[in-house]
Amino acid sequence: MAGDGSKFTMTDQTLYKLTVEQAHEGLKQGRFSSVELTQSVLDRIAAVEDQVNAYISLQPELALKMAQTADERRAGGEDGSLLGVPIAIKDVIITEGITTTAGSKILENFAPPFDATAIKKLRQAGAVFLGKTNPDEFAMGSSTEYSAYGVTHNPWELTAVPGGSSGGSAAAIAAAEAIGALGTDTGGSVRQPAAFCGVVGLKPTYGRVSRYGLIAFGSSLDQIGPIAKTVADAALLLAAIAGHDPKDSTSLKRPVPNYLAEVKAGTGFKGLKIGVPKEYFIEGMNPAIEKAIHQALQLAQAEGAKLVDISLPHTRYGIPAYYLVAAAEASSNLARYDGVRYGFSLPAEDLLQTYFKSREAGFGPEVKRRIMLGTYALSAGYFDAYYLKAQKVRTLLRQDFEAAFKEVDVIFAPATPDVAFKIGQKVDDPLQMYLTDVFTVVANMTGICGISVPCGFAGSLPIGLQILGPALGETAILKAAHAYEQATDWHKQTPSL
Ligand code: GLN
């Protein structure tokens, strides 16, 4: 059915290249079925996955079954932007009956008895689940090298990391091994891998998407967010998963806008006030990135935006404060993995030894480092000096943004200080790894939203433009990102795999 001429010239073999929006249109017009689309993506995965390793687990049979159900629903008169669209899911999000490992050995056999709310919503929308993508263990990392299930390769340069911790999802989108994907962002893990892989990644406002069924890392920071080929696709995916959930008391009771309609109704950059924070252009950053962001700013200005120099004076305290808060919350959240309740267990002579042995063998080195650091920061005598102080820094960071968003609508900044680094380059140097998050953690510390969109290349590796907006400012950042995307064609470039 595909490739009948008028709009799509694609054959069944190249359907995997479609965006969510195009896939929806094609399915709606009956140009191809979800089974055909899903099969095309599965064939693509079979062709490139041994070079990329984006997935921990694939469910081809389940995917085709879900596709068939979607086709039946459509034949019954249903329509919906995700009905029959194949999606990849980061393996820290709980999927009923589908093994969910969080990239850790300690959950190697964990088949959850329930769905995360975001997953339930995707099922209701009729999305097709291709499989679970590789993350850093418990989403702790910036390169996906801390997974217990192997390294994911950057599709643009296979010797480079895809970023992390949602590296599998970002690589899957860049390599066209999924039409859309979900990641999670605790300190940058959607935006940073999106930047490294030349795709779009959105971190929603804290509370915009339910965290129910998201394996907890830093509970006051975690958010599930879409990773996609275009801004419009990110808008569609966000609309599908956002909203209040009685099962997550931190989810916001605010209506979910029709993000795509709002984006399409946008009037480009005209009248938009864009903040340019001086703290995001730092010594030592890749000059090609600095240049690309300035070019993006010039483009926006030429199209009618007003650029405003702003200062976010406490930015440099973001990294130390984040790594205390995230580690403290992780140490508490990970106490439940005791070798008794979930999956992996090394039974020993008594219960205490079972805990010790299972945790010793089940967790990797970065997770252990965070548990120790976090436990220390929370311990009596040190709590005030570390955790409480970090929380106070959080208030200062929030005040920085409150002041800025009185002056401007959105903020333009780089997503990362450098492009993707080589596999192995930072894996034994945690501090260097932590510093890669310098431009992303502050959004999580303050709960605001942000998006990364492709804005150029340094050599063969993509660069991400980060657009930050105030709490519940998703519409504003999506509109600005879409305006930028419309005026450029970075998002149309694909790696040669
Ligand atoms: N790289 C950051 C960390 O290791 C962020 C991780 C994330 O957002 N999940 O904590």
Image (cartoon, rainbow, N blue to C red):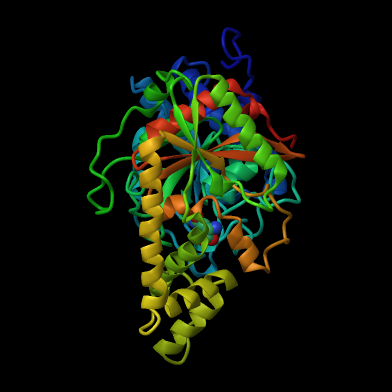
Q: Quadrant of the N terminus?
A: top right
How far across and how far down the image is residue 63, in percent? 50, 39
Q: Is residue 141 above or below residue 327?
A: above
Q: In percent of the image, x 38 and y 57: which residue is there?
A: 396
488 or 261, which lies in front?
488
Q: In percent of the image, x 44 and y 18: which residue is there?
A: 267
Task: Choose top left, top right, bottom left or bottom right for residue 485.
Answer: top right
How far across and how far down the image is residue 190, in percent? 51, 47
Q: Quadrant of the C terminus?
A: top right
- Report whether residue 370 is seen: yes
How far across and how far down the image is residue 168, in percent? 59, 49
Task: Choose top left, top right, bottom left or bottom right for residue 137.
Answer: bottom right
Task: Choose top left, top right, bottom left or bottom right for residue 19.
Answer: top right
The answer to whether 292 appears left or right of 353 in the picture is: right
157 or 280, which lies in front?
280
Q: In percent of the image, x 76 and y 51: which residue is there?
A: 159
Q: Is residue 106 above or below residue 4?
A: below
293 or 378, which lies in front?
293
How far across and how far down the image is residue 176, in percent? 62, 35
- Report whether residue 58 is seen: no
Q: In percent of the image, x 75 and y 44: which residue is there?
A: 157
Q: Residue furthest bottom?
A: 349
Q: Is residue 4 above or below residue 117?
A: above
